[in-house]
Amino acid sequence: ETGVTQSPTHLIKTRGQQVTLRCSSQSGHNTVSWYQQALGQGPQFIFQYYREEENGRGNFPPRFSGLQFPNYSSELNVNALELDDSALYLCASSRMSSGVRETQYFGPGTRLLVL
Amino acid sequence: TQLLEQSPQFLSIQEGENLTVYCNSSSVFSSLQWYRQEPGEGPVLLVTVVTGGEVKKLKRLTFQFGDARKDSSLHITAAQPGDTGLYLCAGARGSQGNLIFGKGTKLSVKP
């Protein structure tokens, strides 16, 4: 086990709705990255949070947003859900020190189905 | 366009056979990582290779990073059913570079 937890494990939503996914990082880690993994694909980087600020973003629209809290846990919010948003959402925590990010550890993911 | 190409996409072999999975790119990466992912779970890190030409061994698994740091291979000797899973390679650029994943190789080892 990596010590990274995610909730919920599964979620079903309909088009147009909004969803919030949660991630608790491993103890001692200050950085959280979120990835989207569609069926049959590798994970795609959404964005990263370091010390409560977004400090890197992949090719995802603004309706994908996030937060990081003082305890370094994080949320991923997706507005106006589309069918293509159906995927496994993974968070990965790591420690950033002196500008160098150490190994990322992944949580088990949240499986989102949009109908 | 996929930045990291993995091959083969699917592999089904018998227990005891050897296999090699490839991860190729036209881009240079500061490091490359191999993960194994089981259904319903997140990827689990197997190894990180950093130096061009580097070879790392993890029991029956041998990982190699290409001299130019653009490609990598994973060789499994005497595969076992417990090796079944999705093998992902991921490249990182720079010290804060986020991971770029390949599509993965789905390995099935039959008893």
Image: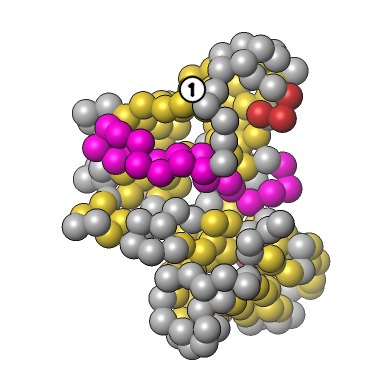
In the rendered image, the vertical position of residue B5 relative to residue A23, given as above or below: below
> Which quarter shows the C terminus of chain A?
top right
Number of marks in picture: 1
Question: Callout 1, which amino acid?
Answer: Asn
In the rendered image, the vertical position of residue B86 relative to residue B15, given as above or below: above
Q: Is residue A67 left or right of residue A81?
A: left
Say if the magenta span includes residue A47. Answer: yes
Q: Is residue B111 visible?
A: no
Percent coordinates x, y for residue A57 in the rendering: 46, 41
Say if the magenta span includes residue B37. Answer: no
Q: Can residue A110 be seen in this view?
A: yes
Subunit bearing disc 1: A
Quarter of the rendering containing residue B103? bottom right
In the rendered image, the vertical position of residue A108 relative to residue A63, given as above or below: below
Extent of the magenta region: A39-58
Q: What's the residue at 56%, 76% (across, down)?
A: B70
Percent coordinates x, y for residue B91 in the rendering: 51, 64
Q: How many C-alpha atoms fall within 10 Å of the one at disc 1: few (<14), some, or many (≥20)?
A: some
Secondary structure at badge 1 equals strand
Quarter of the rendering containing residue A27? top left
Q: What's the residue at 41%, 44% (across, down)?
A: A56
Magenta span: chief secondary structure: strand
Percent coordinates x, y for residue A15 in the rendering: 70, 14
> In this figure, which residue is indicated by the disc labeled 1?
A77
Percent coordinates x, y for residue B6 in the rendering: 69, 66
Quarter of the rendering containing residue A29? top left
